[in-house]
């Protein structure tokens, strides 16, 4: 269901992927990591390098679902002066040159609650944000942001996890739009590799409860893993591996833009090698 | 704000106290806290659970704790008649074990085989390690690296009790980061692990169940005071970090309209200095660690590190029920500085022969402020929620003494 029936960029992108007969690549990076200017250069290069959808992390001091790599990325971004407002400016700057690739903000609720939900949705929509993934807003808290977002025409991407059982799935899917993000491990980001067979079974189970595209993430680091996961899913999400590239280049005085985009190209090649036909 | 019919009926079904509380957790944890809620409701309605808990409280924890008339302090201040609720005499030296005993019995009931906890000063960590040892369950305690450095004796105690103490090196390396890390552990070890939260905060049902397990404090005070004075006290005072000892004392009295109730937050170097832990006085509503409540945060909604000389009050949030009691005005929330707490600490040692923890020294600092102006027949109860042995190094350091 959706308060706004107009297809979003996310809906259109998954429709295009389906028409092309291939799965998609979703890339995650932290806004403002290692600084706002470099982050913008990276994000601007993502579509050309093969990212089909872009997740942009909004830094928070207390990211309780993230592993060390993304925690540190958040601290680097905060140290560089990144705020929610500046993250939205980054999206706006990206949108000036790119009309089609969906961009999804991912993070925690407090910065948005602090910004004011209605003002945030107005500003996010105006900046060109297409969807939100808010880790600490489960279905039980849909009144907070999910329902207002749907009304504003912004997709609220629902997370499903190995602990989300069949009894719970209908409630979790009730207000889902855009796509469903299957968290492939119990745990925090970037710390364990998913078990391919279990993920396949879980994705099949999800499809019994939703017609939405299913993206799988948490723990996918290589083009091979991404390709394997994407055989059964509509998209594979890679985050920590890319964030680590930023960290390494930043520490060595290298170029984070090249470091990230070369991995994105490899990941895209892996995912695009998967054919539905 | 509209006054409720009862101040004791919260939270509502979805875990809210007014706008506060709730269940702001990752989807992975949501089924687990729903299970916990169900298990707790079952346990509450099972007389054998209460009987088992009461038995351990009597024979292992040492309850009821005495209600003690602080005669020399009363004389010294020259006003209100001051009583201490002596929860520092519990096994492990603080009120924390009341809650840990309740939660570990719940964990056993749920068939959980591994215990995790967060700790700041180490008191909750020690209490958790203690009950885990008592029931033979492996226990992991997350503690910020900064706190490990300033609370070495408690770290060693936990290790003696068989717990694994994991240093937390993320973020600011204190209590809030320890709580993040415990949540990360829980999200990873969902099948066998029970998370014993140490205060009246976190996602529903934690604020409710920790409050219920701590309410033994206020229930005892009511009974003891009726025996001793034949009436209810006029004023209750307790210190607040997350607020579990205060909620335990306050909750049974919330609907006794004639009882004035005061919570004392840690003002650190002074509210105006910006270096404090007074989230009600110096913060605003936000969402952290599973609940909405007053938080110390910057303009962007980033959490600001708290400061207090007392590691147990050094937390940038407060339990959601306190936040609601603040909004409704039922409880007055004030603050006391590091300096005030140190003065109270020393006075209590000299006049009463009781070395208080730095946490209740904040409550005592406020008692010293108000007692002289109250009439001699005014009865005031302060929760002496912890003993100060753990703090002697901190106090020596603050007083410029080299041990």
Image (tube, coloured by chain):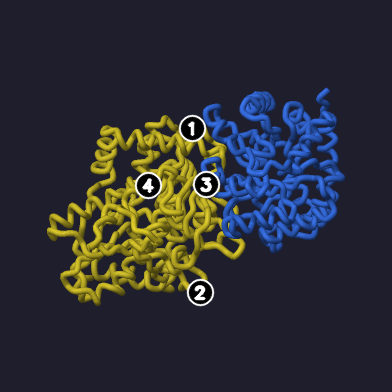
Chain colours: A blue, B yellow
Quarter of the view holding residue A37: bottom right
Q: Residues within 10 Å of mark 3 (few under 14, many from 20)?
A: many
Mark 4 closeness class: few <14, some 14–19, many ≥20 residues within 10 Å: many
- Left or right position of B9 against B156: left
Q: Estimate the x, y position of residue B160 in percent, counting from the top left.
A: 42, 45
Q: Mark 1 points at which residue?
A: B192
C-alpha separation, residue under disc 3 versus residue under disc 2: 31 Å
Give the mark nearer the N terminus: 4 vs 2: 4
Q: Mark 2 or mark 3, which is nearer the start of the sequence? A: 3
Q: Earlier in the sequence, mark 2 or mark 1?
A: 1
Tell me the residue that label 2 is attached to.
B273
> Which residue lies under the disc numbered 3?
B24
Disc 2/disc 1 C-alpha distance (Å): 45 Å
Residue B153 seen in this snapshot: no
Q: On the image, which quarter does residue A165 sit in?
A: top right
In three-dimensional space, the C-alpha distance between marks 4 and 2, rounded to whole angstroms, equals: 32 Å
Q: Mark 1 lies on which chain?
A: B
* First along the sequence among labels 1 and 3: 3
Task: Specify which label sits upstream in the sequence, 4 or 3.
Answer: 3
Q: Which chain carries label 3?
A: B
């Amino acid at each position: 269901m959706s308060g706004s029936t107009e297809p979003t960029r996310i809906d259109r992108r998954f429709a295009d992927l389906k028409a092309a007969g291939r799965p998609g690549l979703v890339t995650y990076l932290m806004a403002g990591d290692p600084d706002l200017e470099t982050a913008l250069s990276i994000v601007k290069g993502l579509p050309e390098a093969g990212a089909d959808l872009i997740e942009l992390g909004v830094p928070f001091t207390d990211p309780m679902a993230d592993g060390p790599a993304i925690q540190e990325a958040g601290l680097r971004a905060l140290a560089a002066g990144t705020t929610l407002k500046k993250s939205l400016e980054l999206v706006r700057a990206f949108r000036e040159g790119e009309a089609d690739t969906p961009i999804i903000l991912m993070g925690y609720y407090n910065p948005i609650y602090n910004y004011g939900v209605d003002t945030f949705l107005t500003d996010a929509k105006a900046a060109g944000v297409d969807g939100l993934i808010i880790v600490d807003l489960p279905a039980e808290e849909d009144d907070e942001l999910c329902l207002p977002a749907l009304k504003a025409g912004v997709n609220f991407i629902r997370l499903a996890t190995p602990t989300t059982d069949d009894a719970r799935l209908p409630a979790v899917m009730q207000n889902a739009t855009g796509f469903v993000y299957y968290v492939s491990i119990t745990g925090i980001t970037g710390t364990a590799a998913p078990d391919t067979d279990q993920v396949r079974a879980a994705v099949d189970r999800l499809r019994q409860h939703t017609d939405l595209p299913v993206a799988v993430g948490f723990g996918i680091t290589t083009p091979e893993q991404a390709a394997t996961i994407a055989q059964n899913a509509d998209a594979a999400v890679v985050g920590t591996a890319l964030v680590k590239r930023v960290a390494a280049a930043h520490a060595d005085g290298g170029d984070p833009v090249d470091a990230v985009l070369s991995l994105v190209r490899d990941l895209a090649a892996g995912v695009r090698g998967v054919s539905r036909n | 704000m509209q006054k409720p019919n009862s101040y004791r009926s919260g939270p509502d079904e979805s875990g809210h106290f007014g706008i506060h509380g709730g269940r702001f957790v990752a989807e992975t944890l949501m089924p687990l806290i729903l299970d916990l809620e169900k298990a707790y409701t079952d346990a509450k309605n099972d007389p054998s659970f209460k009987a088992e808990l009461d038995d351990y409280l009597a024979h292992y924890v040492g309850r009821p704790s005495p209600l003690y008339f602080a005669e020399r302090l009363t004389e010294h201040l020259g006003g209100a008649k001051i009583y201490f609720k002596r929860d520092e005499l519990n096994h492990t030296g603080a009120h924390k074990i009341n809650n840990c005993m309740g939660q570990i019995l719940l964990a056993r009931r749920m068939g959980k085989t591994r215990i995790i906890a967060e700790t700041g000063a180490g008191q909750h960590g020690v209490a958790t390690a203690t009950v885990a040892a008592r029931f033979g369950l492996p226990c992991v305690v997350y503690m910020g690296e900064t706190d490990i450095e300033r609370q070495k004796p408690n770290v060693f105690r936990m290790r003696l009790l068989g717990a694994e103490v994991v240093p937390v090196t993320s973020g600011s390396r204190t209590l809030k980061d320890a709580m993040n890390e415990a949540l990360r552990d829980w999200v990873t070890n969902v099948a066998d692990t029970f998370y014993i939260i140490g205060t009246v905060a976190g996602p529903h049902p934690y604020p409710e169940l920790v409050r219920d397990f701590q309410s033994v404090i206020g229930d005892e005070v009511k009974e003891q005071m009726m025996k001793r004075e034949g009436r209810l006290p006029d004023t209750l005072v307790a210190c607040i970090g997350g607020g579990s000892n205060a909620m335990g004392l306050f909750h049974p009295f919330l609907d006794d309209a004639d009882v004035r109730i005061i919570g004392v937050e840690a003002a650190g170097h002074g509210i105006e200095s910006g270096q404090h832990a007074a989230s009600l006085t110096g913060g605003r509503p936000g969402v952290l660690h599973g609940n909405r409540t007053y938080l110390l945060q910057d303009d962007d909604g980033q959490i600001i590190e708290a400061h207090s000389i007392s590691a147990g009050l050094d937390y940038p949030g407060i339990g959601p029920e306190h936040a609601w009691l603040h909004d409704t005005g039922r409880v007055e929330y004030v603050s006391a500085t590091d300096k005030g707490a140190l003065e109270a600490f020393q006075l209590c040692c000299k006049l009463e022969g009781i070395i208080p923890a730095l946490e209740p020294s904040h409550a005592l600092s406020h008692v010293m402020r108000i007692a002289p102006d109250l009439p001699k027949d005014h009865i005031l109860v302060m929760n002496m929620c912890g003993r100060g042995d753990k703090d002697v190094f901190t106090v020596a350091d603050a007083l410029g003494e080299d041990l």
